[in-house]
Amino acid sequence: MKLIGLTGGIASGKSTISRMILRRKIPLIDGDLLARKVVEPGRPAYKLIIKHFSHDVLNEDGTLDRTKLGNIIFADERQRKILNKCTHPFIRREIFKLLVWYWITGEKIVVLDAPLLIESGLYKWMSTVVVVYVSEQLQLHRLIKRDNLQEHVALQRISAQLPLREKIKYADHVIDNSSELGETERQLNVVLAKVHPTWWNWLITWLGPPTIAVLGLAAVVKS
C-alpha cells in the first residue's frame, strides 16, 4: 500500500483535488474532517481545549465556536501551538486506525489530505508527498474572495502555515493549481499514473514498508 500525502496552503485549491481523487474511488483520509471529529463535545481534545481556552470558545449548544477560536489562534502563535498540542495526538490516532483498516483490506493507494502534513512531520511516513501550489498573490486573492476577509486578516491566516514556496521543497510531485480545472486534473492524472503500483509492487509494499509506516505512526501516536 502506498501512502500519498496531499497538502497545500489555505485557498490553494487542495479540496478541489481531493474531490477529484474521491471521484476516482481512491481512499482518502480527510485531515480536516478528522480535526472536526476529535473536537466534538465530550471528546478528550474538546475537554483540553476548554481547559486551555475556557468556555468562551463555545457556542450556546456546547460545540466549538470555530470562528472565535480561529481568531485567537491565528493572531497568536503560542495559542496556536497550544491548540495543536490539544488536537494533533488524537488526529494522529484516527489516521492510524484508518490506515490499519485500509492496509488490512488491501488498498493499493491511500491519500492522506492534511493541511499541516509538513509542519506536523507526518510527511516523513508518506511514500510520496504531493503539494498543491499557487502563487502567494493568487492564494491571497482567493482567500479574501472565499472568506470575505480584509487583506491583513487573510495575510495573518496564510502566515500561520509554512509558505507554499517552502512546502514544495518537501514534495515529490507538485500540482500547479493556478489555471483551469482541466489543467489541474491533467496534472493529477500524471501524478496518479506515476505513483500507482503494479500488482507485484503492491504486494511488496503491502508486506513491507507499510508495516514500518504503521509502526512509525503508532510510535508518533504514543508520543
Image: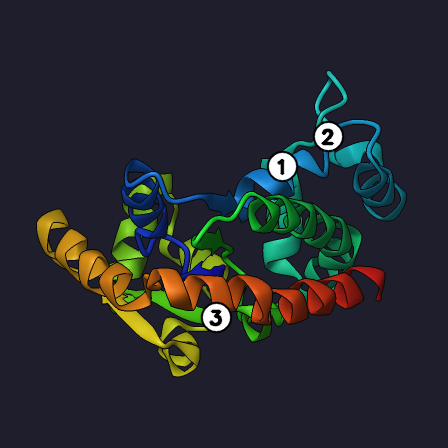
The kind of residue on which mark 2 rests is Glu
Nearest-to-viewer mark from 3 and 2: 3
Give the structural element (helix, strand or loop) at label 2. loop
The answer to the question of whether label 2 and label 1 lie on touching residues, with beta carbons closer than 8 A, is yes
Q: In this rendering, does residue 211 appear at all?
A: yes
Q: Quadrant of residue 75?
A: bottom right
Q: Residue furthest bottom?
A: 169
Residue 83 in picture, x, y percent from top left: 73, 53
Give the structural element (helix, strand or loop) at label 3. loop
The residue pinned by badge 1 equals: 36
* In the rendered image, the vertical position of residue 29 relative to residue 167, given as above or below: above
The kind of residue on which mark 1 rests is Arg
The kind of residue on which mark 3 rests is Ser
Which numbered tag is attached to residue 40? 2
The answer to the question of whether label 3 and label 2 lie on touching residues, with beta carbons closer than 8 A, is no
Residue 210 in picture, x, y percent from top left: 59, 65
Residue 156 in picture, x, y percent from top left: 49, 61
